[in-house]
Amino acid sequence: MAKKTARKASRQPPPPVVRALAEPRTALPETRPPAPEARPPVARRNVDKKHTINDIARLANVSKKTVSRVINESPFVREETRTRIAEIIRSTGFTPDPQARGLAFRRSYLIGLVYDNPNAPYVINVQEGALGALRRVGYELVVHPCDRNSPEFLSDIRQLVSRQKLDGMLLLPPVSENNGLADLLREISCPYIRILSAALDDPENLVQSMDRQSAAEVAEHLAKLGHTRIAMIIGPPTYRSSQERLEGFSNALADRGLTLSPDYIAEGSYTFESGAACAEMLLSRTPRPTAIFAGNDETAAGVYRTAYLRGLRIPHDLTIIGFDDSPLASRLCPSLTTMRQPIRDMGRLAAEKLIAKISRTEGPSAAASTVFPHLVVRESSGRPAS
Amino acid sequence: MAKKTARKASRQPPPPVVRALAEPRTALPETRPPAPEARPPVARRNVDKKHTINDIARLANVSKKTVSRVINESPFVREETRTRIAEIIRSTGFTPDPQARGLAFRRSYLIGLVYDNPNAPYVINVQEGALGALRRVGYELVVHPCDRNSPEFLSDIRQLVSRQKLDGMLLLPPVSENNGLADLLREISCPYIRILSAALDDPENLVQSMDRQSAAEVAEHLAKLGHTRIAMIIGPPTYRSSQERLEGFSNALADRGLTLSPDYIAEGSYTFESGAACAEMLLSRTPRPTAIFAGNDETAAGVYRTAYLRGLRIPHDLTIIGFDDSPLASRLCPSLTTMRQPIRDMGRLAAEKLIAKISRTEGPSAAASTVFPHLVVRESSGRPAS
DNA sequence: GCACGGTCTGACACCGGTTTCCAGCCCGGG
DNA sequence: CCCGGGCTGGAAACCGGTGTCAGACCGTGC
């Protein structure tokens, strides 16, 4: 009996860890069979009798393969049989086990969402948009915040994909601009969709936001209000969106006979702090700009801060325009005029596109999907005072 | 040959959908074997030869069971064998397939994160905190935004858990207060941890924030500044956190000889709009309060808005205190004094606790874990003017 | 009545791990 | 020297689905 109990020890609840493998097991081999202690019955999880495909097959008096055919909508099942089995499946509430299914299909029904965007509302919205589309077709989303500057970044991703056998990946900006990542995913043939701010050399894997046109819309708004001394704070110059927004803005101003002087361009980093610092610089110029187009809402909030410290009134002394229409925009006082990005839609689009890529192994290389931001005019923009 | 090709059709890429089962297949059975069209080779995914436990076993000249024993740290393997196999595993970079493993163990190595909190930074932070702890032990996080008022809410959750065989669930406030949900999870024996704002009757499944003490800290701060006409905007009265914060605040004021008059208590809903509306009401009282403790930062932003519209200066005319220390707090002008919640830590704690629950099937019913917010003093609080 | 071709169906092996059960080895004791 | 028990390691079955392929079924044409 003692023997029997000892045996049981090898059947302890599955240790979740696999890492520590290499380290040479520090201690005392003599404590090996340590605990013939009567281990509690080791509650098997979910003992509650879920139906399996075998149950269904038995109930329907067919082989499990036929049930499988019905589940997978194979055309080689007689209509009558199909209906009967489908009815049984429905009435028993049977759902095939994704793990077993995945094991056989070499699929996981999991999609990875990779992001390094500090803007929480942005991430959440993409996440929820994507989830809406994914759930509908039986996929789940696993999130993966990352640091694209970490030396283990790429190997982390590689490991995540291969360990979990992810069926696809959604990449959010700014990490979506990383071509090394895209190359890696292509190499391990993991379908992916990048959410990006502009055309790249990878159109079929893209959901893009038309930043150039959006920035032009801002320019038009400012021009109409009568501003002439217009400044802009761009994001990190390596970001595609920064370039696009800058070019679109600058060109659109030029079209209206206005110029965006280099003195009036500041290089931020899409953060609150950088917005404040850049505004500090821009507002020291003489003559002072009467309007600042901030790279995003965070940056705009930084401009608010500097304006506040300097006692400038918005929009009387200074017009400010943001980009994103994050919740922050309406929280600021005065509320912020900003470009609204249909972020949730971008998530949904990206998910749908990814699913399409996964399903038809060979599709007609689709073009990039695009979404168009639009201007939400609030209180922070007005006619220039002087 | 034509026959052969037709057969192939049954081998089309696995249709991800399982829903439409019941609906009686609308159309034309005669189009049944529709496409003997030469389907492209149907690229099997990940053809790139991952190692399996069999490879390892062959390399080590042992049976796969022995490899399995090493992986699962069974004591019944000779030290020398164990080391040798571990070395081979390490050098090949082998990782056991979670799906196969899960299938055998009846586990998924997936944890669900259920939330209905509109506060994006909150969710993201919990998410990342939890993920840090989960990844380390081989779990992944699947996110599940939900609507606790939807009639399908509970059945959705039930289905999610049973379909994906989730190993555990993390519940965020406010949905974490839903006892029906907790009951359901207990019923289907799915381990869960609730992140909540105060003690409930379910201590072993709790990570709680000490809201009562926190609110007291706010009271002390205001008292020290010399405020006497102090108002409070609470959250939805059904939320535990609202009650806790109210009681803690009110009692602490009383301890200092101050009273929280019913006239100075407004019932909000933790939203920006409700904050503005409640402030409107509170600021109409005579005498006007000199300080408002808002239920959270969103609400505080609403108060800012009303103060802005009324031309009140902060903190000269009105002191405002928030709760959460969300990014918003430092973006507002003037910046908001608020209680900082260690949200990321709460996520981490919750995950660790959940893992503990999952691992030792029978643990000593642990007490709730608690975290303590602390006051971050910024610009929005000061001595009363009058 | 029979060969024939196409439509369905089921037996069987497999996906990559795990547990069960058992046999072989080694050792000390009688 | 034989026996028995404790440690190791392997063969086979299993988890819950899938692909493969042979064969049953059925209506035709001769």
Image (cartoon, coloured by chain):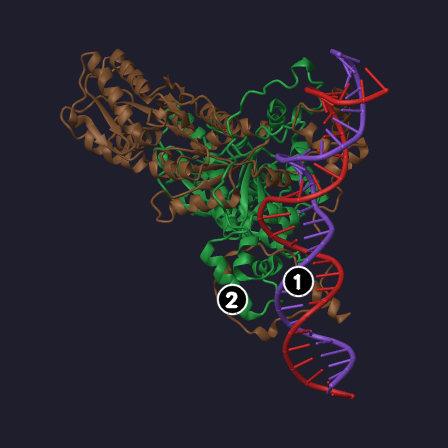
Chain colours: A brown, B green, C red, D purple
Q: Quadrant of residue B76?
A: bottom right
- What residue sits 60% from the left and 34% below the top? B237
In this rendering, does residue B42 appear at all? yes
Q: Looking at the rendering, in which quadrant would you find the N terminus of chain A?
A: bottom right
Quadrant of the image containing the C terminus of chain A? top left
Position in image of residue B127 (x %, y %): 50, 42
Identify residue for label 2.
Answer: B83
Distance from disc 2 to disc 1, alpha carbons, whole Å, reads: 18 Å
Crowd rating for badge 1 (residues with CA inside 10 Å; few <14, some 14–19, many 20+): some
Query: x and y percent of residue B96 in the render?
Result: 55, 51
Q: Is residue B367 visible?
A: no
Name above or below for residue B236 compared with residue A9.
above
What is the quadrant of residue A181 in the picture?
top left
Say which amino acid is labelled 2: Thr
The residue carrying mark 1 is A10
What secondary structure is marked by label 1? loop
Nearer to us in this view, B26 or B188: B26
The label nearer to you, 2 versus 1, is 2
| Count of numbered circles on the image | 2
Q: Position of residue B184 (x, y in %)?
A: 70, 40
Foreground pick, A73 / A49: A73
Q: Position of residue A206 (x, y in %)?
A: 40, 26
Chain that bears disc 1: A
Give the SS element for disc 2: helix
Category of crowding for the residue at label 2, using alpha-carbon neighbours closer than 10 angstroms: few (below 14), some (14–19), many (at least 20): some
Which residue of the protein is positioned furthest toward the left in this rendering? A286
